[in-house]
Every structure is written in C-alpha cells, then in structure tokens.
C-alpha cells in the first residue's frame, strides 16, 4: 500500500456509542478513513453498494437484518468484500458460522481498542484474522458432535421455557421423541441438565444470535 492510500472503512453497529468510539479510534490513524456508517443489516447492504469500502466492520445482533444475513447479502453481490465481525460473543459455533458466511476476521469488541487497526490492516492485505480466545474455543470443540437442525429447534424451545409436552405438540412428535432429542443434546454439549445445555448453547452461539 502506498503512503498516499488510505483504507476506506464502513462501520455497521446499532449502538451509536460504539460507532462513535470506532470513529474516534479510526480518526487518529492516517492509514484508515471512515467513509460511511450503518445501524442495521439493511443499511449495511445499501451503504456497501453506494461506497464499495475496502473493509467493513460488522456487528452481528442488529434489528431488521442480522449481521450474518448482511454478510451473506453483501458477499452475494460482491464476492471480494472484506468484512470484519465485531462482537461480544466468543462462541466457537457462531464464529464458524460467520466465517462460513464469508467474514474475513472475527474480533471481540472488548479488544477493539487494542487490535482493531491491526485487524483492518491484515484483512485489507488479504489475510484472515481470528482472535486467539475464539481460535482456542474452536480448537477445544473440534471433535464435538454437531447438533442436528431438529435438535437445535428443540433446544430453542427449551430455552423459551417450553415443557416436553408443549415441544411435542408444537413439533408434532411424541414426548418420548422429545426426551430422546434432549438426551442427545445433553450428550453432545456435555451438559448436566436442560438449563446447563441452554447456557452452553448460548455461550457457544448454537442458539441466540
């Protein structure tokens, strides 16, 4: 990159204070230029089309359209888009979903002040960047069995507080089948009980965002 070039950045987050913080951080460095902002996924797609930034900073949990859906939409139109996810979630399952959707980096918001500029430089140079804590989470669960779509659906209903009877009625299956799904969920997540399974699933990003 020549000294006269700057990395053009789009910042996407539904929290104005975070966008202000990122704007302040980027303004202190001559290598980067904040060219546009968006507060949800729909605006993110629109602003990307309008400005074609070099790097996009993307939150995940936003109204109207999530960050993951926005990544998929942007990458569908612009396969070369370089997107960095900024999130509070360190879960391995969520991180892998985001990377599969096309993000080039996954950075925890608590590390933004320390690592954001290096992450932007790396992604702009064509590299991938995964925070070490997240990489460790992915490594720790590499050999785990994944939950099936049906098991995830059951787990979401458990998280909602539904009983086995209610889950069975909603999914048009027997209570015995529900119990079988829950046993499989507990085994795959290495959970002690239903409450523990929900907590683990939320932390890892199996359900939630």
Image (spheres, rainbow, N blue to C red):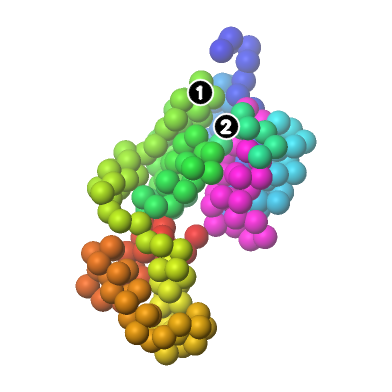
Mark 2 nearby-residue class (10 Å; few <14, some 14–19, many ≥20): many
Nearer to me, 106 or 207: 207
> Mark 2 or mark 1, which is nearer the start of the sequence?
2
Residue 137 image point, x, y percent: 30, 48
Residue in the picture at 63% in, 15% down: 5
Q: CA distance from mark 1 to mark 2?
A: 8 Å
Residue 12 figure quarter: top right
Residue 44 shows in this picture? yes
Residue 181 is left or right of residue 78, and the answer is left
**Residue occupied by mark 1:** 126
Work out which residue is located at the far top of the displayed protein and give it.
2
Element at label 1: loop
| Boundaries of the magenta span | 53-75
Quadrant location of the N terminus in the rendered image: top right
Element at label 2: loop
**Residue occupied by mark 2:** 82
Say if the magenta span includes residue 198.
no
Residue 51 image point, x, y percent: 74, 33
Residue in the picture at 60% in, 36% down: 56
Nearer to me, 146 or 2: 146
Residue 136 figure quarter: top left
Nearer to me, 111 or 48: 48
Residue 156 image point, x, y percent: 45, 72
Nearer to me, 111 or 157: 157
Q: Does the CB distance between marks 1 and 2 fall below 8 Å?
A: yes
């Amino acid at each position: 990159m020549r000294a006269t070039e700057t990395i053009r950045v789009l910042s996407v987050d539904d929290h104005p204070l975070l966008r202000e913080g990122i704007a302040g951080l980027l303004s202190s460095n001559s290598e980067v230029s904040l060219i546009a902002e968006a507060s949800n996924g729909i605006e993110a797609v629109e602003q990307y089309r309008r400005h074609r930034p070099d790097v996009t900073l993307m939150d995940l949990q936003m109204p109207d359209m999530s960050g993951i859906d926005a990544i998929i939409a942007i990458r569908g139109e612009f396969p070369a888009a370089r997107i960095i996810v900024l999130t509070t979630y360190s879960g391995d399952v969520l991180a892998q979903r985001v990377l599969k959707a096309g993000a080039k980096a996954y950075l925890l918001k608590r590390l933004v002040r320390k690592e954001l500029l290096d992450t932007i430089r790396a992604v702009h140079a064509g590299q991938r960047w995964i925070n070490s804590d997240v990489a460790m989470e992915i490594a720790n669960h590499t050999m785990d069995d994944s939950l099936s779509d049906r098991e995830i659906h059951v787990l979401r209903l458990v998280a909602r507080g539904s009983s086995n009877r209610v889950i069975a009625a909603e999914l048009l299956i027997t209570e015995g089948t529900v119990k079988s799904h829950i046993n499989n969920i507990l085994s795959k997540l290495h959970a002690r009980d239903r409450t523990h399974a929900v907590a683990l699933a939320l932390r890892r990003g199996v359900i939630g965002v």
